[in-house]
Image: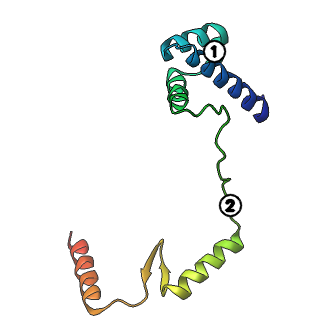
Amino acid sequence: MSGDERDIKNMETRSAIGFFFLQGKAPKGIRTILKETLRKHAPSYATVKNWEAQFKRGDFSTCDANRPERHKTLTTPEIIDQIQELILEDMEMRKLSVKWVPKCLNADQNLQRRQSSEQILEF
């Protein structure tokens, strides 16, 4: 089933939920009717309840709200190299093993690193 067909079926189902809502039926009753009619294609009880809440707010639109499309992403070796160059230039970092560490440590950081290394060696 294509996306357009699915959207149409969803709109039809939502219209049916709206119709039964206007008749005063409770969400459980609406779900029961839809389950008998649509069988495995019936929406869940939570879906019926959500649409009923929307109809109660006075919004009788059965279409999905427009969502901004996600930007397409592309990862290539060239882009990875460019990002690494930017990091090296802007943040004064260098790659040491798998971690990124500052190029220059101040005296306290250097002392702490040395002490930690010695403790690990003793352990």
Q: Is residue 43 visible?
A: yes
Task: Identify residue for label 1.
Answer: 40
Query: Which mark, by number, is residue 101?
Result: none
Q: Is residue 93 above or below residue 65?
A: below
Q: Is residue 50 above or below residue 67?
A: above
Task: Identify residue for label 2.
Answer: 73
Which quadrant holds residue 109? bottom left
Q: Are marks 2 and 1 in contact (CB under 8 Å)?
A: no
- Residue 121 is left or right of residue 67, and the answer is left
Q: Quadrant of the N terminus?
A: top right
- How far across and down, in percent of the image, does residue 57 sit? 51, 33
Q: Quadrant of the C terminus?
A: bottom left
Tell me the kind of residue under disc 1. Answer: Lys
Name which residue lies at 55% across and 88% down.
89
- How far across and down, in percent of the image, does residue 67 sit? 64, 48
**Which one is in front in this view, the residue at disc 2 or the one at disc 1?**
1
